[in-house]
Amino acid sequence: MNKKQIVRCPNCGNHATRHHFTNNQIIETSCPACDYLMVNCSRTGNVLESYAPGIPSS
């Protein structure tokens, strides 16, 4: 079962979409306003892929 949520983007604060894909244990958060993307494993919390324009990497 897949679940969709509307959340605030951690990059720009606009509305973003969070998809929970239970068949492969992935959570994907994306924002169309600033092109933010974060893909996490829902079991471990590890980041699988990310793209956040305007946020400096540490």
Image (cartoon, helix red, strand yellow):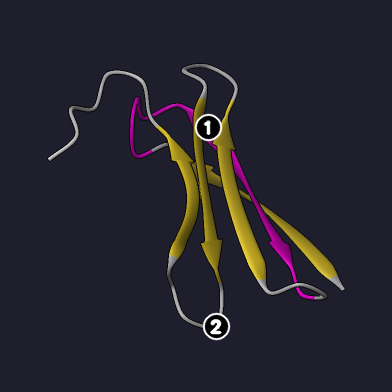
Q: Name the residue located 56 percent from the left edge and 74 percent from the top edge.
A: 42
Q: Nearer the viewer, residue 2 or 52?
A: 52
SS at badge 1: strand
Q: Which residue carries the number 1 mark?
A: 15
Q: Which mark, residue 43?
A: 2
Please, is residue 44 above or below residue 20 in the view?
below
- Residue sitting farthest toward the right: 1
Left or right relative to 22: residue 47: left
Q: Amino acid at mark 1?
A: His
Please, is residue 53 above or below residue 15 in the view?
above
Q: Quadrant of the C terminus?
A: top left
**Residue 17 belongs to the span the image colors magenta:** yes
Q: Name the residue located 43 percent from the left edge and 68 percent from the top edge.
A: 46
Left or right relative to 46: residue 1: right
* CB contact under 8 Å: marks 2 and 1: no
- Residue sitting farthest toward the left: 58
Q: Nearer the viewer, residue 4 or 49?
A: 49
Q: Nearer the viewer, residue 23 or 7?
A: 23
Please, is residue 42 above or below residue 49 in the view?
below
Q: Name the residue located 87 percent from the left edge and 73 percent from the top edge.
A: 1
Residue 37 x, y percent position in the rendering: 52, 37
**Reading the chain from its start, which is encountered first: label 2 or label 1?**
1
Front of the two marks 2 and 1: 2
Q: Quadrant of residue 32?
A: top right
Q: Amino acid at mark 2?
A: Arg
Residue 12 x, y percent position in the rendering: 35, 25
Residue 36 x, y percent position in the rendering: 47, 29
What's drawn in magenta, residue-wise? 10-22
SS at badge 2: loop
